[in-house]
Image (tube, rainbow, N blue to C red):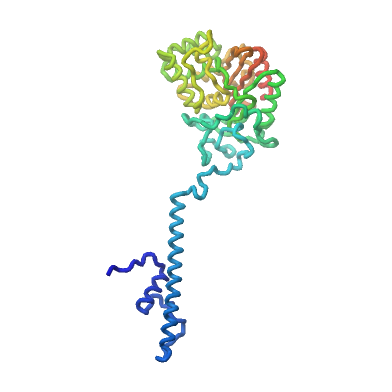
Amino acid sequence: MKPEDTSGLSELGQAARDASATGSVKDPDWRPFPRGDEPVADSQAGDIAEAGGHSQRFWLGIGFAVAVVVALVAGGGLLLWANPEILGSSSPSAAPSSRVTGMSSGDSIGNKSPNPGQSLADSPETETKPCQLNGIEGTSGVPCEADSELAGSAGTASPPAGGTGAGAAEAVKGCDGATIVAPAKGKLTALELRQKFEALGEAAGAEIAVAWYDPKYGLVTAGKEGAWPAWSTSKVPLAVAVMQDGKGLDLQASMRQAITASDNAAAGRLWQGLAASNSERAEAMNRVLRQAGDSKTVVPTEQKLEGYSIFGQTTWTPTNQVRLAAALPCLKDAQQVTEFMGQVIPDQRWGMGRLPGAVFKGGWGPSGEVYTVRQFGWYEDAGGNRVFLAMAVKASSMSTGIALLDSFASVLR
């Protein structure tokens, strides 16, 4: 006969089984009869035997019940270990206290909430897929898929008012160690800043699309999504692509003219010298955008508007321009380009160019019956901290557009 399997029994259950089988016990403190019982006369043997049988069956039942409970607890623990989502661990975690919880999806594309003075690279991940400003994290090539619903939402969704927004934003470190702050830090909240931009646009009868980085909210927008032609702002990723392709020295003079003076002929030489075909040239520019975390923008391969460059008609939103701006300080081979962005000629230093320490590029051109005027890059606040910003307007004329960007800059001083 095979030995009985006792692995499922508790110590108490095994003792009860042993007592039932042999009449003896392993635990000196456990007996099948009440403590103090003594051997009795034969006339009482039947009663005692019956009582002993009932007692043994009782303790066997108790032992079996304990064994079942132990097995259930062990099985449940194993199940939870193998399937943590049962406890909800796969659900997004609650927003950290340093993050304002009233933000809607259109207001912020960030999922990390750094503590004051903490770099985004060091802040804890949320349970959801992160979608941050890559340049500030010091990472690259991480597509952000959370901004597909930005169109139209920026003008209606609002950050909470009162003591939140830019005035209460923490400073974080950029990829190169520079301190990053929100626009108008200490003066305007994110909501107040958005309202001022939109009021200025409405007063000018223009459409606006503004995006900036706020350490408290992530990417914040005002006005429209701004999926408009990039015009000459596209010369920045073009120049970086030329540098990364190892042709920067040969085309350095053209690069300087294309960035500092927005010279179209010089930019055309960069485009032609980048690769043998339009598709290869566009792909080289796309690689630069992907390195900055922009998974949406695609440089065209064919001319969209007669008389204008192929790359200048790239549809590019201010939010994705801020992504590139934030990545530029650490993007491979981009240093020469950012140096030229800090040397824009006086005639083109309107808008962002009026702000201290501005490193930027502007672009402008006709879009039907209106004129698109735009800029992106960064500037420095009074404390020497870096602010990432992209501004675009559709106005009745270029001069109206420039005046509106000047008004935006005045708000930020």
Report x, y in % for residue 326: 54, 27
Q: Which quarter of the rendering shows the C terminus? A: top right
Which of these two is toward me, 34 or 28?
A: 34
Residue 223: image quadrant is: top right
Q: Residue at x 61, y 16 (%)?
A: 373
Q: Is residue 47 visible?
A: yes
Q: Relative to 29, does residue 359 appear above or below in the rendering? A: above
Residue 384: image quadrant is: top right
Which of these two is toward me, 176 or 131?
A: 131
- Left or right relative to 325: residue 40: left
Q: Residue at x 44, y 63 (%)?
A: 70
Report x, y in % for residue 246: 41, 18
Report x, y in % for residue 314: 52, 18
Report x, y in % for residue 48: 43, 85
Q: Which quarter of the rendering shows the N terminus? A: bottom left
Which of these two is toward me, 383 or 4?
A: 4
